[in-house]
Amino acid sequence: MTTTTEALTRADFQTDNDVRWCPGCGDYAILAQVQRVFPTLGIPRENFVVISGIGCSGRFPYYMNTYGFHTIHGRAPAFATGLKINRPELSVWMITGDGDSLSIGGNHLIHVLRRNVDLKILMFNNQIYGLTKGQYSPTSEVGKRTKSTPMGSLDHPFKPLSVVLGAEATFVARTIDREPKHMAEMLRRANDHKGTAFIEIYQNCNIFNDGAFGHLTDRKGKKETQLTLQHGEPLLFGKNQEKGIVFRNFAPEVVDVEEVGLDAIHVHDEQAPLAYHQTLAQFTAPELPTPIGVLRAVERPAYDEMLNAQIEAAVDRRGRGDLTKLFNSGDTWVVGER
Amino acid sequence: MTQIVGETLDPPAAQQGAGEERESVVIRFAGDSGDGMQLTGSLFTHTAALVGNDLATLPDFPAEIRAPAGTLAGVSGFQLQFGSTKIFTPGDAPDVLVAMNPAALKRNTDALERGATIVVNVDAFTERALSRVGYDVNPLEDDSLSAFQVLEVKLSSMTIDAVEHVGLGRSDAERCKNFFALGLVYWMYGRPLKHTLDWIAGKFAKTPEYVEANQAALKAGYHYGETAEIFAHTYRVPAAQIEPGLYRKVTGNEATVMGFVTASQLSGLNLFLGSYPITPASDILHGLSNYKEYGVRTFQAEDEIAAVSAAIGAAFGGSLGLTTTRGPGVSLKGEAIGLATMIELPLIIANIQRAGPSTGMPTKTEQADLLQAVYGRHGESPTPVVAPASPTECFHMAIEAARLAITYMTPVMFLSDGYIANGAEPWLVPDPEDLEPIEVEFHTEVEGFHPYMRDPETLARPWVRPGTPGLEHRIGGLEKEALSGDVSYDPHNHEHMIKTRAEKIARMANSIPDAEVFGEEEGELLLIGWGGTFGALRAATMQAQRRGMKVSHMHLRYLNPLPRNVGPTLKRFTHVVVAELNNGQLRRLMRDEFLVDIQGLNKIQGLPFKVSEIMARIDELLA
Ligand code: SF4
């Protein structure tokens, strides 16, 4: 029985279920990092709950030796909200995919974010439907040829970070399955955030959309395509950090650092006005480097906390309710013996 | 809390002995949405309760929030029946109709029977108002109302005169006319003014001129009745034999709210409501939002699906999860209810039915979601269904729904309807000591634990709260291996689990009471009903029995599974008729289950049964 947190190791978070993702799937790397980070968070194992929707990502809870709940397609945010409101002491992690959270579950995603329920959301974006065997997803690029779009898909894709920033999410980050250290840091940052923390994880589906993020993970090219964000640090990238981002009339521009001087390069601010984070969310390689890291981290009271504070306030004001009080409230009258 | 002791069981002195005695009277107040008819009806009800009558009420609101004044669509009505005997329904046809304008008269004339009294506000019968609702000729001037006793009262102008001394503007003064009308009806039935005068004083305490004006209008109406001598008769309705105790007037939705709060207290579980606004269920959301000090957490979700999903999330966390809606909302929740069936967690889905399908008739009642409740999901997902029979019974059945959900670890459907949700009656407030606690046991023992091990009697699986050390496990919508709960696609295991889940619901019949048979246990005709048709069926059965007919009434509160005595009872009657406000849904279920030739009495007009409609069928079968 585990009641202390000290002794926890990665093995404590592994189950004896066979992991059934396709060999080589990016999900394995994510699972491994989550299992490595959880024991370091100082939370008793029994207080972790992992909640998922449907899709390849939906299987995640079965492989985590915590409390887990594999719910229905797209609705995991609502299940997680109901749980967190009632059990604020639990550490609730939600696993979802691009189809689960942006197609069928788009509504729930924006609402959980605007409410700022204290949940950690890991969205595995592989830009394809894996479990249903290869249809295009709401994040697939235009013109994608799949079983359901033999002449190419027509719909303009969502940029997930732009959508969640539109809902004024308080914590927005991005990482990549192939960047385990970076991922671990993002998981820790999410854990420390009070409110909904949203992490988009680029995840390679090697069966139906292999190499979708190759340009971001390729050893040689990635320095040109990734923009690693650090709060208070200038926006630099390139093989030798020789390129930088400046804003002219709100428009981002890639500049040569030597030419403009380091001081001219825009400094990343996680608490800047939303418009800045929205602009960053639009950056897509190769035109502009794809940002990796925490785009936005701001404070706003968490919904579950406020809701429970109202319960306490009502108890303070009117005293704890019991049946005698309940039955004697309202307009009552007595009918006497006749 | 304003506790008023019913100080008088006697009519005022002026009326003592005067007036013809009546066992029960039906009154309908009707006017424009802005005329305050709901309030007028409620105040009459309050006084009737305090003088010791039994009663039942039914509001009839327009569907539009602000229909144009003076139109048929904007008519708002409130009907009540009060009496000296047990009152089962708000009444078939009004003995008295108070019509504040031509629209109210036109909308309600068809509901009247020969000899009824109509009080009209003659001031409102202008040419414009008449033509607005399609009266070519003023009905007060031709003989179209000759079957009724019509009392033309200058309600508006007399009210303005009566409150003139207060100095309100003309239109404010005119707005007191509902109190004038109420005063007049109080006089007709020898009711005391005190309770309403007190109510006005409390309600408008901050604006003394309204207190004075409304009280003056009420008294003026009463005195007008006394002095004008336009009434041929006044009536007296003695107090009923009512069980002594503390009473409170409740609508079905109010009783439902109280029932779920009580279930939470009896089980020691926090109540969580996930809901999305929808008529006629929204009042439960409003009501429960006011019980925060009882630990009730309410969550207005982004949609119906999120509402039920959040309730399941709450149940997973160890709270009492509830979601409230009507039929189309249940359709949206279907997938999540299937999941709750699979993961075997307690959940209550309260469906306050109204006329459908689709948007249907928003303020009209119907009982057409029964088959949806019993069958309306994907896969084999048996769901228990309970249905209160009256406004006050919503309290008890809400507790029952919770008890069954918790004891059997299953979603349970609570089926109410617009008729009982909005109808009101006096509720004998229970003594908390008399209520049975609901036993809840959260499993904490690590030794020998399996997520899908079962109680040998109920077949319920253990309820484990996340946060319990050593019992970490996963649940979800994939088929479970019996015992371990691990994902399993084994063919025989699937069949075994389907049958086990069905058997669990079937065994519920062990812990629900037999259905009461009102009347003889055998005879010529058994009337069967469920839900809000109770009052009309019971009243008709009593009439038939008084006439010596061998009619019994069985009203079902548990619809899935059915009580054990239902099958054998059917076979002891020559005729069995299921009366319901749908196209024969319970009838279909029962024929399927018992292979008995059951007949139907069905009405699908958005309206409750009239006692006379049921009597007509009884006569047809037995005469
Ligand atoms: S289909 Fe793609 S995403 Fe799904 S498990 Fe296989 S590789 Fe991973």
Image: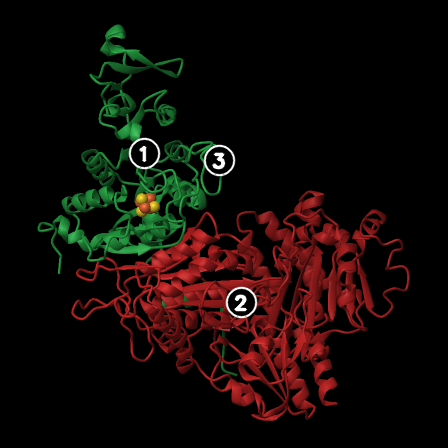
Chain colours: A green, B red
Report x, y in % for residue A275. Answer: 39, 24
Question: Which residue is pictured at 39% across the width and 16% down the height?
Answer: A251
Given the current orientation, which residue lies at the most extreme left position?
Answer: A7
- The earlier-in-sequence mark between 3 and 1 is 3
Nearer to us in this view, A20 or A55: A20
Chain under disc 2: B
Report the amino acid beneath label 2.
Ser
Report x, y in % for residue A278. Answer: 38, 27
Report x, y in % for residue B218. Answer: 66, 59
- From the viewer's perspective, tell me whether residue B29 is left or right of residue A7: right
The residue that mark 3 highlights is A153
Q: Is residue B492 visible?
A: yes
The residue that mark 2 highlights is B416
Callout 2 secondary element: strand
The residues bearing labels 2 and 3 have C-alpha atoms spaced at a distance of: 47 Å
- From the viewer's perspective, tell me whether residue A60 is left or right of residue B584: left
Tag nearer the camera, 2 or 3: 3
Report x, y in % for residue B174. Answer: 71, 49
The residues bearing labels 3 and 1 have C-alpha atoms spaced at a distance of: 19 Å
The residue that mark 1 highlights is A211
Chain under disc 1: A
Above or below: residue A152 compared with residue B126: above
Callout 3 secondary element: loop
